[in-house]
Image (cartoon, rainbow, N blue to C red):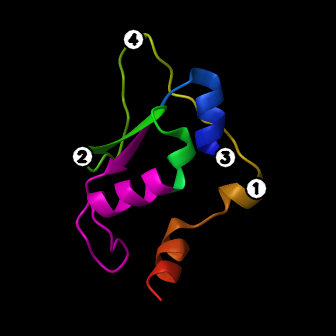
Amino acid sequence: MLFEKSLEKTGQVIIMVRDTPRDDSNPFDFEDVKARIEKALFKFEGKFEVIKVPNITNICYGRGVGYKIEEIVLPKQIQDISATNIRKQLLK
């Protein structure tokens, strides 16, 4: 839903995947995650890109630079989705 709302606003989306070490709570490497995203969003091919970024903990800026950082609030049932729980289910 977040992807589709973002695409409606801008016509293009960058999906940033943090570069984190693999462990029990993060069992997939970047290439695994990227492939899963591309498979799930195949009907939007050409309208998004998946990139690897450092393990970001904060986004800071000092002045307006031509873009916004905006939160899109989704319905509670979607906001409550746990990626950790989804990963656990995938590994069963």
Q: Return the x and y of residue 25 as percentages of the image width and height.
A: 38, 75
Whether residue 79 is situated above or below residue 72 in the rendered picture: below
Q: Return the x and y of residue 64 as percentages of the image width and height.
A: 43, 11
Inter-mark Cα distance, 3 to 4: 27 Å
Give the label on residue 1, or none: 3
Q: Of the residues shown, which amino acid type is indicated by label 1?
A: Lys
- Give SS at disc 3: loop
Give the label on residue 76, or none: 1
Inter-mark Cα distance, 2 to 3: 25 Å
The residue under label 2 is: 54
Give the magenta range. Answer: 14-39
Whether residue 75 is situated above or below residue 13 in the rendered picture: below
Disc nearer the start of the sequence (3/4) = 3
Q: Of the residues shown, which amino acid type is indicated by label 4?
A: Val
Inter-mark Cα distance, 2 to 4: 21 Å
Q: Residue at x 44, y 10 (%)?
A: 66
Whether residue 87 is situated above or below residue 68 in the rendered picture: below
Q: Return the x and y of residue 28 as percentages of the image width and height.
A: 32, 69
Q: Nearer the viewer, mark 2 or mark 3?
A: 3
Q: Of the residues shown, which amino acid type is indicated by label 3?
A: Met
Q: Compare residues 61 and 16 and report the one nearer the observer.
A: 16
- Give SS at disc 1: helix
Q: Residue at x 47, y 74 (%)?
A: 87
